[in-house]
Every structure is written in C-alpha cells, then in structure tokens.
Image (spheres, helix red, strand yellow):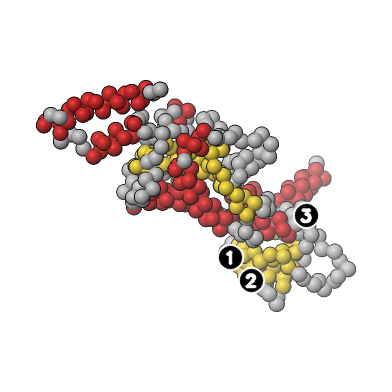
Amino acid sequence: MWTKTARASLRVLHHLHHCCGQAGWRSKWTDRGQRQLCRLLSSSGPPWRLLFFGSDQFAVESLKVLTDSRSSSEGVVESLEVVTLSADVPVKKFAQQNQLPLHSWPPDNVDGRFDVGVVVSFGCLLPERLIHKFPHGILNIHPSLLPRWRGPAPIFHTIMHGDTVTGVTVIQIRPHRFDVGPILNQELHRVPEKCTADELGAILATKGAHLLMDTLMTLSERMAHKREQRQTGVTFAPKLNTSMSWMVWEEQTCDQIDRLYRALGSRMPLRTLWMGRTVKLLDFVGKCHISLSDERRRPVPGSVSYQKETNTLAVCCKDGWVGFKAVLLKKRLTAADFYNGYLHQTAEGLFVSKRRESQTHQMRKNLTL
C-alpha cells in the first residue's frame, strides 16, 4: 500500500520528469534535486540530516566521528549542524574549526531541515515542541548503564561508588525529564582498576561515539525494537559540588577516600579543617602503612602523622591511614613545609571533619547558654 509520502513523491517525480523534457527546465534538475527526491522516496534510513546538541569534551568525540562520516563511504551523515550553549565550550570551538554551521540555544528555523537530533552532554532539557520537529526523534548518548546513574555526573558517581562495570547507553529523548527515554542501544564496559573519572570519561566518550554511529546506521530497526528502561535499579548522579569534597575521617575508609580522590581530584581538592581553617589536601598517595612511637595509644580519626622518610602527611581514617604529599593553606605546602611551619608548633595534630566541627561548635554554644 502506498503511503502519503510515497504518493506525494511520485507526483513530484512525474512533474519533474515532465519539466525536464522542456529545455528551459532541464538545468534545474540538479544532482541536489535528485538527492532530495531520493530522500522523499526513502526517508526511513541514512544518510541523515543531523542537528547536534553538545558542550563539553565528552561531546566533541561524538561530533568528530559524525563530522568524519560526512565524507565516508558508509553514507550515514548527509549534513551536520551544531547547537551550543556558550562561546567557550569545546563543542563550539570544534564546530568553528571544522566549518560546521552553528546555532545558538534555543535554535530556531529547524522545521523540515533535519531528520534526527543528537544530544551529548548538553545540560538543557529540550522542550516537547522542539523534539517533535525531528521526524526520527532525538538521540542521547549517556555514559552509564541506564537506569543506573541518571543525571549530569554519571562517570564521577561510577568511580565514587566503586562500580566495577559501567557502559554507554543510547536512548531516545523524551520531554519533561532527563535520561528516562527508551533504550535503543547499550554496551557494557568493565571499569579499569584505579582509574580516574577523567580516564574513564575518555574511554566512554570514544565508545559512545562508535555506539552512536552503529545506532544511526540501523536507526529504523532500533526504533522498532526499543525497550523501556526498567523501574528497578534506578540511581541518580547529581552534579558535583564542593560539599562532596569534605572529608569525614571517622566514617570514610581508605578505599572510599581513594575512590573519592579519583572521582573528584581533577576538578576539586579534598578538604578538611585544621584549627578552624580549611586545608585542601593535594597529591594523594593512597593507603599508608605507618608505625607510631606509642603503639598503646589508639589514634582517633583525623590524627596526622608526618612521615619524614617518605615526606608524606599520613591521616587516620575509619580503618587505616591515607597519605598526601602536599596541602594548600595560604599557599601550596609540601608535607615537610606544613609539618615544620605549622604542625609541630602545636599540640593539635588533628584534622577535623566539617560535621564534627559543627557539632563541637554547637556543644560549646549550648554550654554557654
């Protein structure tokens, strides 16, 4: 049975064939016109006219692959344009360097110009009216095994919580909520031991770009077999903030501190308090095995011991000691500088969690009432 699109395309074909028989119209039957007609006759498959929404370096990896695909023999991408949020994001710089047409957010004049949208690390919820302007929907690459770690920071939470397996998921965008659309494609990836969030992000960015291409090559089939996300196992990955970086020595184990540093270390330092002042902990070296001068005295969490032989500040946590090579007080100080300039001059060799400091302050306040 002929569809409306096919019948309309056939009428266009008959009209163009008639016109092309006249000398005045023959020059108008260009290669571009033939490609547009082929698109009308077969609009359910590639090559696609794509509009890409992205911002950060993770998104650039997918944009690179899409850009290269325009000239490849696979013919997945016919045209590619880009939507960005601000002037200084990596996606905009890449688009300018590669002469890709740019749109500001929110884009206008998209009606009938694109087949598929692609969203990667964009950070803005797309309105329903915009989603409906793409006949084949809008795809999103998310660096987790959805529904685990919905939200803006899945890679950091993967590291922070010690996940051993993660992956990349391609979903179809739905309006009103992030990361809830049906799954079109998904690939697992084992998290390398001791890897940082930056290292895992680079791996998943490459994997996500190739998974996107695989999805676009078989999009109609993927759409026909899409599956809703399960209702169980849903977790959320909120945006990073400095509150996550404050140490709670009495509660955190050596492994937890190690994961926290690998998750946050490149974005923000771990923090603690010393004599009411904020100390930023730098150059984490992991678990320390130390010997104390008084073995009978059990150290309390937050106790600091300077290890001269390794030039390390060892700090007691819930189940052992972890080490740092430097701190930031007024300025960056090596472990030796901090010990010589501050630590050995006071009897208080103790880092205090912000929570404990608040509790102590409240107790003192109550006693004075």
Say which residue appears at 20% left-offset and 34% top-offset: 29
Which tag is nearer the camera, tag 1 or tag 3? Answer: 3
The residue under label 1 is which amino acid type? Arg
The residue under label 3 is which amino acid type? Glu
Residue in front for this viewpoint, 123 or 194: 194
Q: What residue sits right under mark 3 in the picture?
A: 250
**Quadrant in the picture for the C terminus:** top right
Q: Position of residue 223 (x, y in %)?
A: 50, 34
Say which residue appears at 47% left-offset and 38% top-offset: 219
Residue in front for this viewpoint, 120 or 214: 214
- Above or below 228: residue 273: below
Mark 1 burial class by Cα count in 10 Å: few <14, some 14-19, many 20+: some
Query: Residue 332 shows which numbered tag?
Result: 1
Q: Position of residue 135 (x, y in %)?
A: 42, 30
The residue under label 2 is which amino acid type? Asp
Label 3 with label 2: CB-CB less than 8 Å: no
Residue 269 seen anywhere in this rendered image of the structure: no
Q: What residue sits right under mark 2 in the picture?
A: 337
Distance from the alpha carbon under mark 3 to that under mark 2: 26 Å
Residue in front for this viewpoint, 70 or 363: 70
Judge left or right: residue 89 versus residue 27.
right
**Quadrant in the picture for the N terminus:** top left
Say which residue appears at 34% left-offset and 52% top-offset: 97
Which tag is nearer the camera, tag 3 or tag 2? Answer: 3
- Badge 3 element: loop
- Above or below 20: residue 72: below
- Above or below 264: residue 299: below
Judge left or right: residue 357 versus residue 178.
right
Mark 2 burial class by Cα count in 10 Å: few <14, some 14-19, many 20+: some
